[in-house]
Amino acid sequence: MLRQRSRQVVFLVPRAARAVVRPLSNLIRGMVCGAVIHPLASIGPRVHIGRGCTIGRCRLDTMNGRGEIHIGAGTTVYNAVEVLVHGGTVRIGRNCLITRASAIITGGHEFRYSDRLIQEQGTFARDVQVGDDCWIGYRAIVLGGVTVGEGAVVGAGAVLTRDVPAYAVVAGVPARLIGRRHGLRIKGSGRAAGTAPAV
Ligand SMILES: CC(C)(COP(=O)(O)OP(=O)(O)OC[C@H]1O[C@@H](n2cnc3c(N)ncnc32)[C@H](O)[C@@H]1OP(=O)(O)O)[C@@H](O)C(=O)NCCC(=O)NCCS
């Protein structure tokens, strides 16, 4: 009841006031974390942003006050990305590129019983992990329970329903393996990009 009330109050806060509060809180959060955060990014509670991150005009939301989001140092989250956590934890590794309009969604509605409304069946949430050095392509969707291995590449428009091995390249709906990254040295990084393990 209290939570419902507070949600109503948040909804009623005039747009003008939010237009001041949000840039200010993003500026302060950015200074505290050592990150660059877009003034209009919508960032909920229990979102932990690592040093050197760049966060665009995206939505990182722990909905209903449940769950957590962790974003590793040096990761870039582009505009229009949505990370919606309905419970559980989303962990994004270091130095990742979470490209424009992609989404990570941890949960959904229970629907198995046909004799009851879906609305009445409650919700579920599962953790999502994205390893270091991953590239999530434009409009890709990562669903709850999925682990994206270190160094993986997810093609534009892919829907991830299963785990992705490290250094794999996946694409399509549902996402399938289409290739692998090789152990070539990244120019200037002083380290190998990694050798892809057998899938
Ligand atoms: C996933 C991706 C990196 C693969 O690049 P690649 O290794 O050069 O792959 P190729 O172009 O050689 O394609 C290999 C196969 O996968 C298919 N494929 C590639 N990308 C695909 C995608 N996003 N969805 C479905 N199929 C895809 C190709 O059609 C090809 O199929 P075929 O062998 O039957 O002809 C790239 O296609 C992609 O989606 N990039 C994301 C771009 C993006 O989101 N940019 C945002 C701005 S940063």
Image (cartoon, rainbow, N blue to C red):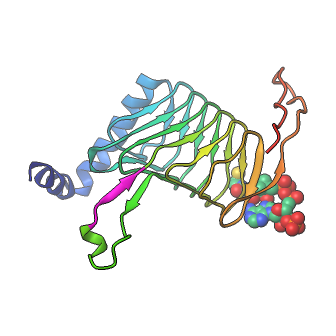
- Viewed as shown, does residue 190 lie left or right of 38? right
Residue 105 image position (x, y, % from top left): 47, 54
Determine which quarter of the picture holds residue 159.
Answer: bottom right
Rendered-image quadrant of the C terminus: top right
Magenta region:
121-125
Residue 160 image position (x, y, % from top left): 61, 57
Q: Farthest residue toward the right?
A: 184
Residue 100 image position (x, y, % from top left): 60, 54
The chief SS type of the magenta part is strand
Q: Farthest residue toward the bottom?
A: 115
Residue visible at 28% across and 79% down in the picture = 115
Residue visible at 67% across and 39% down in the picture = 149
Q: Is residue 98 magenta?
A: no
- Viewed as shown, does residue 156 lie left or right of 59? right
Determine which quarter of the picture holds residue 151.
Answer: top right
Residue visible at 47% across and 34% down in the picture = 70
Q: Nearer the viewer, residue 73 or 78?
A: 73
Determine which quarter of the picture holds residue 29.
Answer: top left
Q: Nearer the viewer, residue 159 or 121?
A: 121
- Viewed as shown, does residue 33 lie left or right of 189? left
110 in relation to 99, above or below:
below
120 in relation to 36, above or below:
below
- Viewed as shown, does residue 64 lie left or right of 7? right
Residue 127 image position (x, y, % from top left): 47, 44
118 in relation to 103, above or below:
below
16 in relation to 132, above or below:
below
Ligand 1 lies in which image quarter? Answer: bottom right
